[in-house]
Image: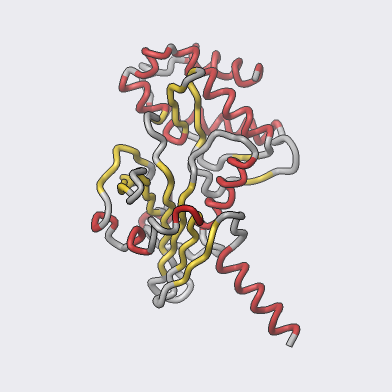
């Protein structure tokens, strides 16, 4: 009996992962799974995670590996819906289908919520959902609260936001948020200009780090080698998006690095 109970607990942990306080788990008749913030459960259900997101949502100007969807919830807030997609080699092989358990949306929800609890600037996750097309495979969605007035760093360069707030102010805000993340022992597996959101707030410009899918936790401060690797990854993003160095010249990168080490 004990072995049966332990096996059941192991299966439960594999299926859900660590669910933060304040969230509830729901399973529908098809075996789809939803983790939703308790104070949002009246507004978010499985319909928000349909195979055709356009059935319930509109295209958002925010983008990651694909266009995000946005939906107006009953209480007036706007939620952003991100369908998980593979990058790199797996993009053309498995596309939107995953087989790693616990599901990646549930893991990202737990990581993001923990970072918010520690006081780091990131988005508020409303829910995460997975559907089961066949066997151990799943498709996943993450639903977050829209950060009103925010622009990703790359968009901010192009829209004129950086010119309005000042390049030095913007770079300092970004450097401070990344430094704070590294102090908490977090390695961001996909640090790039589109995963850094800038917003003008009452006390100045703030930077929010998002998309913690595949992030890694280290005990204590992130080792210097890993922190430098993270900055190098960000630097590659700069080179890829701005190869002509029109928005982010070398002098700006050096200034950013100096702000990072001073933070």
Residue 89 appears anywhere in the view = no
> Measuring 36% from the left and 47% from the top, which residue is drawn there?
75
Whether residue 17 sits left or right of residue 169 in the image: it is right
Q: Position of residue 113 (x, y in %)?
A: 57, 47
Q: Is residue 194 above or below residue 169?
A: below
Q: Quadrant of the N terminus?
A: bottom right
Query: Is residue 124 at least partly visible in the picture?
Result: yes
Rendering coords of residue 109 (x, y %): 53, 51
Nearer to the camera, 200 or 152: 200
Is 173 drawn above or below residue 134 in the view shown? above
The quadrant of the picture occupied by the C terminus is: top right
In the image, 214 versus 36, the foreground residue is 36
State the image quarter where residue 138 is shown: bottom left
Residue at 60% across, 71% down: 12
The residue at the point 37 percent across, 13 percent down is 164
Residue 128's place in the image compared with 148, above or below, is below
Specify how the rendered protein is coloured. Answer: secondary structure
Q: Quadrant of residue 145?
A: top left
Q: Is residue 24 left or right of residue 55?
A: right
Q: Position of residue 177 (x, y in %)?
A: 57, 28
Residue at the image position 49 percent from the left and 14 percent from the top: 169
Q: Residue furthest bottom?
A: 1
258 w.r.t. 78: above or below: above
């Amino acid at each position: 009996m004990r072995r049966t109970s332990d096996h059941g607990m192991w299966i439960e942990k594999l299926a859900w992962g660590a669910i933060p306080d304040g969230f509830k788990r729901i399973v529908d008749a098809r075996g789809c799974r939803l983790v939703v913030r308790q104070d949002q459960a009246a507004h978010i259900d499985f319909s928000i995670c349909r195979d055709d997101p356009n059935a319930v949502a509109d295209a958002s100007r925010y983008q990651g590996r694909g266009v995000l969807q946005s939906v107006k919830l009953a209480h007036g807030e706007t939620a952003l819906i991100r369908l998980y997609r593979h990058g790199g080699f797996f993009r053309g092989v498995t596309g939107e289908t995953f087989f790693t358990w616990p599901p990646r949306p549930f893991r990202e929800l737990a990581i993001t919520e923990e970072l918010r609890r520690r006081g780091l600037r990131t988005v508020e996750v409303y829910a995460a959902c997975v559907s089961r097309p066949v066997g151990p495979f799943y498709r996943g969605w993450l639903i977050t609260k829209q950060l009103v007035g925010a622009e990703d760093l790359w968009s901010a360069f192009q829209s004129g936001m950086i010119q309005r707030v000042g390049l030095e102010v913007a770079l300092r805000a970004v450097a401070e948020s990344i430094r704070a993340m590294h102090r908490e022992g977090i390695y961001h597996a996909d640090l790039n200009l589109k995963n850094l959101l800038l917003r003008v707030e009452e006390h100045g410009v703030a930077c929010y780090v998002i998309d913690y899918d595949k992030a890694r936790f280290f005990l204590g401060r992130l080792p210097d080698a890993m922190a430098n690797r993270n900055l190098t990854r960000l630097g590659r993003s700069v080179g890829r998006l701005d190869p002509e160095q029109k928005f982010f010249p070398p002098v700006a990168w050096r200034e950013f690095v100096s702000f990072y080490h001073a933070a």
